[in-house]
Amino acid sequence: MITSENKIRVRYDEVDKMGYVYHGNYAKYYHISRTELLRKVRISDKELENYNIILPVIEMTIKYLKPVFYDDVITIKTTIKELPTSRMEFFHKVFNQNHEIINVASSTLIFVNSNTRKPMRVPEIILNKLKSYIKTLN
């Protein structure tokens, strides 16, 4: 299991007329958190591009539990529970400043060759980085 935590301060342009964070912004928050988790294990978007790999989101589920407001600081905890094969699933928990869980989600990404646009198995170099990071935790 690999976990990463990121803090984000809600900006004014991210709230709707009701004063809540607009629901669509959570996808952006999850993207930031996924990117930082992969960066933690030395996998960057730039490196993926160099290997002609893209990771489109193919599924996302979100459960909103409590609202978040402008200038709140949220913590996004993102976890990969198992090594990927051709898909990589991320689990997200979002906490408010009072450490209350406000949102839970999962997002599934698939490995795709950017030239052929066809799904592919996770490349060994990526899999090895994930495995190496898990070993250092044990």
Image (cartoon, rainbow, N blue to C red):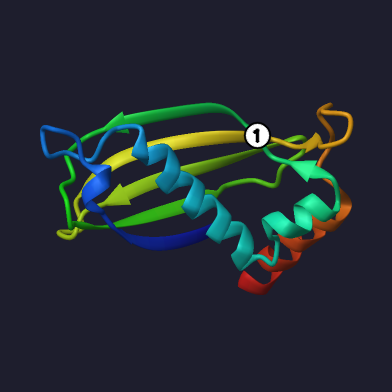
Q: In the drawing, does residue 116 fall left or right of residue 92?
A: right
Tell me how many marks there are: 1
Task: From the top left corner, tell me how far across and down residue 24 is, in percent.
Answer: 35, 32
Residue where numbered disc 1 is placed: 56
Left or right: 79 with respect to 18?
right
Quadrant housing residue 134: bottom right
Q: Which residue is drawn at 54% across and 51% down?
A: 34
Amino acid residing under circle 1: Pro
Visible in this render: residue 1? no
In the picture, which quadrant includes the C terminus? bottom right
| In front of the other: 46 or 77 | 46
Quarter of image, res 102: top left
Image quadrant of residue 115?
top right
Residue 2: image location, x then y, percent: 57, 58
Q: Looking at the image, is 128 positioned above or below residue 123?
A: below
> Which quadrant holds the N terminus?
bottom right
Q: Which residue lies furthest to the left in this view?
A: 18
**Element assignment for label 1:** loop
Decide: few, some or many residues near mark 1? Use Cα within 10 Å; few <14, some 14-19, many ≥20. Answer: few
Q: Residue furthest front?
A: 13
Q: Where in the figure is residue 122, as x and y percent of width and height? A: 81, 43
Q: Is residue 40 above or below residue 65?
A: below
Q: Is residue 126 visible?
A: yes
Is 30 on the left or on the right of 23, as rendered? right
Rendered location of residue 45, percent (x, y): 68, 55
Side of 24 relative to 85 (left or right): left
On screen, residue 110 above or below 101? above
Residue under the point 36% across and 40% down: 26
Q: Which residue is drawn at 30% across and 32% down?
A: 23
